[in-house]
Image: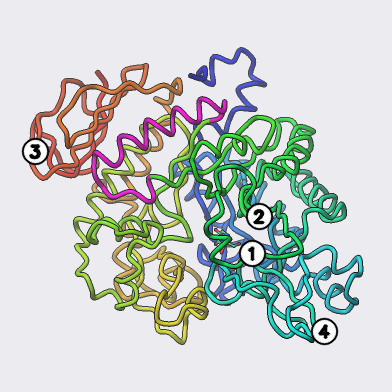
Amino acid sequence: MTEPITGNGTAKAADAAWWRQAVVYQIYPRSFADANGDGLGDLPGITSRADYLADLGVDAVWLSPFYPSALADGGYDVDDYRDVDPRLGTLDDFDVMIKALHDKGIKLIADIVPNHSSNRHEWFRAALAAPKGSPERDRYVFRDGLGEHGEAPPADWTCMFGGPAWTAVGDGQWYLHLFAPEQPDLNWRSEEVRADFLKTLRFWSDRGVDGFRVDVAHALAKHLPPDLPSEAELAAMDRATGTHLLWDRDEVHDIYADWRRVFDEYDPPRIAVAEAWVDPPARRARYASAEGLGQAFNFDLLEADFAADAFRPIITDNLEQAADSGSSTTWVFSNHDVIRHATRYGLPPNGDEPRKHGRAWLLSGGTEPELDVAAGLRRARAATLLMLALPGSAYLYQGEELGLGEVASIPDADRQDPTFFRSPGVDVGRDGCRVPIPWAADGPSFGFGDGGAHLPQPEWFGRYAAAVQADDPASTLALYREALALRRELQTAETLAWIPSGAEVLHVRRDNGWEAVTNFGAEPVALPEGDVLLSSGPLDGRQLPPETTVWLRA
Ligand code: NOJ
């Protein structure tokens, strides 16, 4: 396995490897902190919380899109890749924010959205104004419709949010959007598109951005033959060979080879992490390679139930895969796309669609099936403490350090997620994890800002507020702070040894004697030898209670 960071010889190498075992905190900017009281979180809001982030002990912030956007998909519909949404601030505010973070030793990873722009991007406006076959249309994926006048879509494909993936532009042509109609797919065969993104990467890197999270990294390269297959034929195509028409094509890596050359122009090199839902998992390796983006998300724990036999192979396999690719793995339980893990773990185990775990509960407005809030939080704390003891980088989502649960009570009239509008009655979407987080027990927007919150906060949010937890040693915030401080001290080589344990217990050891033991079962188990450093819940003498993790030093 990979050498420890400190074993690389030079300080320069250590600096370049900062990301390998970093704790990265995801900020969904419109829901983090609102400095100007307009109900929408903003960049000065983030700056005002730099101390909080430093006290929490994170190594980096991953900032979800902050670019100008009509918010058809929470900012993943970008109008201009080299500017800031005026409602969130200015480029000067961005500079102030990044300096405040850097002054605290916190790096910044910007979200970049290369698969699609928004339909308000100047390129797309130009494409609509230009005729069929024009260079302006060639920056996107246009096709003639079927039927005498092109009145039918080129294919019956559905987009990721439900509904058709092709939209007509009125002259017999249609454009492809794998996501919402407001998110036209860019044509990555266009040299202009490729060159412009290199410019964007340099633009933000020059402003001090330390790395990029690459949205839908596996979709950029597409091959659309003259006769398009049907949705059913597309679904039946093998995704494992790099030849699927839309997803995870091998030539996507040529794009990232170009990006890597840009990243390596900087010192330390800019880093990148791919959001690439590929199958089989071995196909992550090329995204994670040193010639490519360098790291790729593994969402396996996010999809798993809280169970020892689910966690164990995921941990083993991902550490092996990351080592094979020369990268380090990424652990994540929650993000802006899935139901928060403190809630997930309080619901019955997931069904056939792990990424949609909790969907039925959300649809019912949080009534069916019954949620066990206490069990959810207990399991979330145990799972997180285990995750933080593993080699690799840990991605946290804003609010999880408060033990925050999903909001199921958002009225339909307040919903924003395109999934809700495009899948009526089937999926209410992802707004429940994007509700502005509570900073204070009461007051306007629970301290989020002086105005309202752009998604309604439930009354119970006050109990989870950062201010309520700050001085409570038993709070989830205190647990995260202590865990991150200890992790920083204990972090060591990227190797993991498994210590034999009962079927419902996972017991791991790092090479410096740092151990984590998780009891996933319903009965207490004897605590192994060693000094207790931290535990996710109260211990009972030398007994490890159910659904609890302890850190030990042998
Ligand atoms: C993945 C992002 O995480 C998600 O929020 C977004 O809707 C899609 N990509 C489309 O950009």
Query: Can you tell which mark lies on residue 417?
Result: none
Q: What residue does disc 1 label?
A: 229
Of callouts 2 and 1, which one flags the residue occurring earlier in the amino acid sequence?
1
Residue 175 picture quarter:
bottom right
**Within 10 angstroms of label 3, few (less than 14), some, or many (20 or more) residues?**
some
State the predominant SS element of the stretch in magenta.
Answer: helix
Query: Would you place residue 51 above or below residue 347 in this image?
Result: above
Tell me the residue at 61%/53% (across/down): 247
Image x and y of residue 335, in percent: 46, 56
Query: Can you tell which mark lies on residue 245?
Result: 2
Tell me the residue at 27%/21% (across/down): 553
User: Disc 2 residue type?
Assistant: Leu
Image x and y of residue 74, in percent: 58, 69
**Within 10 angstroms of label 2, few (less than 14), some, or many (20 or more) residues?**
some
Whether tag 1 and tag 3 are in contact, CB under 8 A, the answer is no
Of callouts 1 and 3, which one flags the residue occurring earlier in the amino acid sequence?
1
Tell me the residue at 62%/46% (across/down): 109
Q: What residue does disc 4 label?
A: 171
Secondary structure, mark 4, is loop
Whether tag 2 and tag 1 are in contact, CB under 8 A, the answer is yes
User: Disc 3 residue type?
Assistant: Pro
The answer for how far apart the CA atoms under marks 3 and 4 are is: 69 Å
Whether tag 1 and tag 4 are in contact, CB under 8 A, the answer is no
Q: Which residues are magenta?
A: 301-327
Query: Can you tell which mark lies on residue 524?
Result: 3
